Amino acid sequence: MIELHTAATPNGWKVSILLEELALPYAVKVLRLDQLDQKQEEFLRINPNGRIPAIVDRDEGGFAVFESGAILIYLAEKTGRFLPVERKARSVTLQWLMFQMGGVGPMQGQANVFYRYAPEKIEYAIQRYQNETRRLYEVLDRRLAECEYLAGEYSIADMATWPWVSIHDWAGVSTDGLPSLERWLAAVGDRPAVQRGRAVPPRPDVKPTADQFAKAAAKTLV
C-alpha cells in the first residue's frame, strides 16, 4: 500500500495521476496547506523540506520518498511502467521530466505568485515569469510537433508536466498559437486516470471547479 501525503496542487496531482495510471492501491493523507500541516514534525519526518507531495511505501517497510520527480521515478521503477529501461529512451524521458522540474514548475509557480498573490503588483516580476513560462511552453510545443508525447511514448514526463500547463490561465499565460501543446493538453486530459488523479484529494459534497483547483495550486510554493 502506498500512503500519499498530498494537497490539491500540480505537484500533488503528478503523483496521484501516476498512481491512478498504475492502478496501485493507495491511501490519501490530505495536508491542509493553509494550516501549515506540511510544517508539522510528523510530516517533516517524511519530508524534511516540508512540502507536498510525499509517499510512504508500506510494502517496503515504510520507505519514504519526497520530491515529486523522485516519487514518479520510484513508482515507475517499482512497477516497470512509464519509464523505459533502454538507456537512450530512459534518458529522453528523464530529460523532459527534469525540464519540468527545473523549468516549467518553478517559473510558472513564480508567475502564479506575482500575478495572483503578491501584495504589491510588480510589473517587472510578473512579465519576467510570464514570459519565461511562455518561452518554456514554446519549447514544449516544438517538441510535441515532432512526437505525440514528450518522450515519444506516454510517460512520467507527461504526467509531471500536464498538471502545470493545464492551469496556465491562473498564471496569466496563454497557449494561443501553440497547436501541438494544445493538442497534447487535450489528449492527456482526456485520459480517465488523469481525470481521476486530478480529483485527488476529493472535496466532500462539492465538485471542484477549475478555479478552485487553480487557487489551491497556487499554494504549491508554501
Image (cartoon, helix red, strand yellow):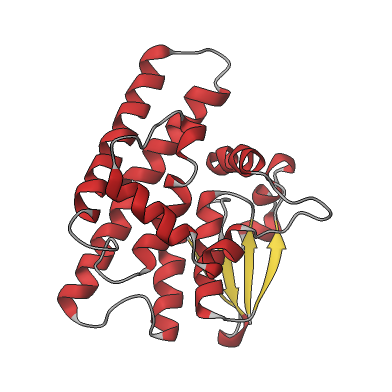
Q: For the point 62% across and 67% down, which residue is it?
A: 4
Judging depth in this view, the residue of 9 and 74 nearest the camera is 9
Residue 179: image location, x then y, percent: 29, 45
Q: For the point 22% across and 62% down, which residue is it?
A: 147
Q: Relative to residue 118, is residue 159 drawn left or right?
A: left
Residue 24: image location, x then y, percent: 57, 81
Q: Is residue 118 above or below residue 163?
A: above
Q: Relative to residue 79, is residue 36 drawn left or right?
A: right
Q: Is residue 2 above or below residue 59?
A: above
Judging depth in this view, the residue of 33 and 188 nearest the camera is 188
Q: For the point 63% across and 42% down, which residue is it?
A: 216
Q: Tell me where residue 1 sits by quadrant.
A: bottom right
Q: For the point 81% across and 56% down, which residue is it?
A: 204
Residue 2: image location, x then y, percent: 61, 77
Q: Relative to residue 40, is residue 23 drawn left or right?
A: left
The quadrant of the picture occupied by the C terminus is top right
Q: Is residue 46 visible?
A: no
Residue 159: image location, x then y, percent: 43, 62
Q: Is residue 90 above or below residue 208?
A: below
Q: Is residue 200 visible?
A: yes
Q: Is residue 105 above or below residue 124?
A: below
Marker count (numbered): 0
As drawn, the residue found furthest toward the right would be 205
Q: Tell me where residue 133 sits by quadrant.
A: top left
